[in-house]
Every structure is written in structure tokens, then in C-alpha cells.
Image: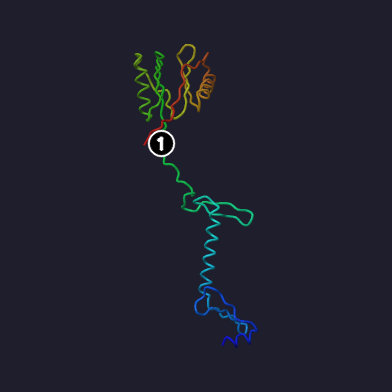
Amino acid sequence: MRESLVHKLGRPPIRIRGCERHREIAAIDGEVTMHCIPRIFLALITLLTIGSALAEGRCPPGQYPVGGQGVGGCAPIPGGEGGTQAAPRPTGRWIKTWGAISVSPASGAVGVSVGQKKKSAAVDEAQTRCMTEGASDCHNLTAFKNQCVAFATDHKNKQARANTGASKDQATERVMGDCVKAGLDQCKVVYSDCAKPEFISY
């Protein structure tokens, strides 16, 4: 058989080291018969695996290489150490607070309240403080939530106005405008404050 192959091909069969008993690759009539394909196939897979590992080795742990030749980069492996971190859990929440102003038309007494969690609590506190000054006709002039207030009276302290805004300056500007519209003489701001949001921890 060996002699017939040599005679037909004009050269001895190619021998490959590492094969088993049949260690020849013979070309017969243009058809290639490979007796060592399993071992060669295994060697190719091993080389590809090693190449992939080397390519990934140029990136930090938890990332893999991206980009083509000459334009390389690294990207986080989904679910790996380099992936997106979970957002921190909130430790509490902000709540809006109420404020109120009560006045006595007869005596000019004023009661104020800020920082209450409920409107009713702010109004009650302002009423109580107004009556503490001896007035019996106190009534709620305004209640405000999560904003600032300015309180102004005329020069005789008989008429009053109140208005709100995002800041004390804005509230003051608005209340002075109210005084002008009402025709109050020599109006001045006697009180301003803000009902600020409060942070409540869980």
C-alpha cells in the first residue's frame, strides 16, 4: 500500500507527530483523508481559548476588551465586578411644613406659627399666641405651606396685609404691593419667616 501511494503521488506520505497508529495524511485523487483530525481539532480549540484569555488579560478584572484593531478599549462584564453599582438606598424623606398668622383687629395683637406638619396645628398655635396677648377677637389672617411669608401693617397698626413667596424678599415685595393697592398709608413689614421642609429619617 505504501509503495502504491509513493508511486501514485511521486512522494512519500506526510507524517505528523503525535498521531496514533495511523499517522498519515494522504492525498488520493484530490480527496484528503485525515486520520488525525480529532487531535488537530482539539489543538485548534485550545489555541483559540488561550488567545481569548490573553486578549481579555489586557483589561482590568471584571471587564472585557472591545473595539477593533488599533481601537481597543474595555467594557464592564454584565453582572461582574466592573458592572453598574446599585443606587444607594434613601435614609429618609423630606416633608413640607405649615405656618400661619393670626391677628386681632381691635388690639393689633399678632400670633405666628411655623414648622407645623399640619395646617390645623399651625392655625391653632397662631391663634393661641394671639390670644395670649389678651385679645379676644383673634382670627387667622393666612396659612402657608413650604414657603415664606411677610406681614405688614399701616402706620396706625390698624390694618394688616400678608403675602407669601419663595423667599422673604419676594414675600416682602408682594405684601408691599398689596399695601399700595389697598391705599394703606406708610405700610411697613413687621414680620417675615419661612416654613421650611423638614427631613425625617427612616
Report whether 186 appears left or right of 69.
left
Residue 32 position in % (x across, y down): 59, 80
Residue pointed to by mark 1: 93
Disc 1 residue crowd, few under 14, some 14–19, many 20+, Cα 10 Å: few
Q: Is residue 149 above or below residue 75?
A: above
Determine the secondary structure under disc 1: strand
Q: Nearer the viewer, residue 151 or 185?
A: 151
Q: Nearer the viewer, residue 73 or 163?
A: 73
Residue 194 position in % (x across, y down): 45, 25
Q: What residue type is disc 1 on?
A: Arg
Residue found at x 38% / y 27%: 116
Residue found at x 49% / y 12%: 155
Residue 191 position in % (x across, y down): 46, 18
State how many labels appear: 1
Identify the image quadrant of the N terminus: bottom right
Residue found at x 48% / y 26%: 164
Q: Is residue 102 above or below residue 11?
A: above
Residue 200 position in % (x across, y down): 38, 33
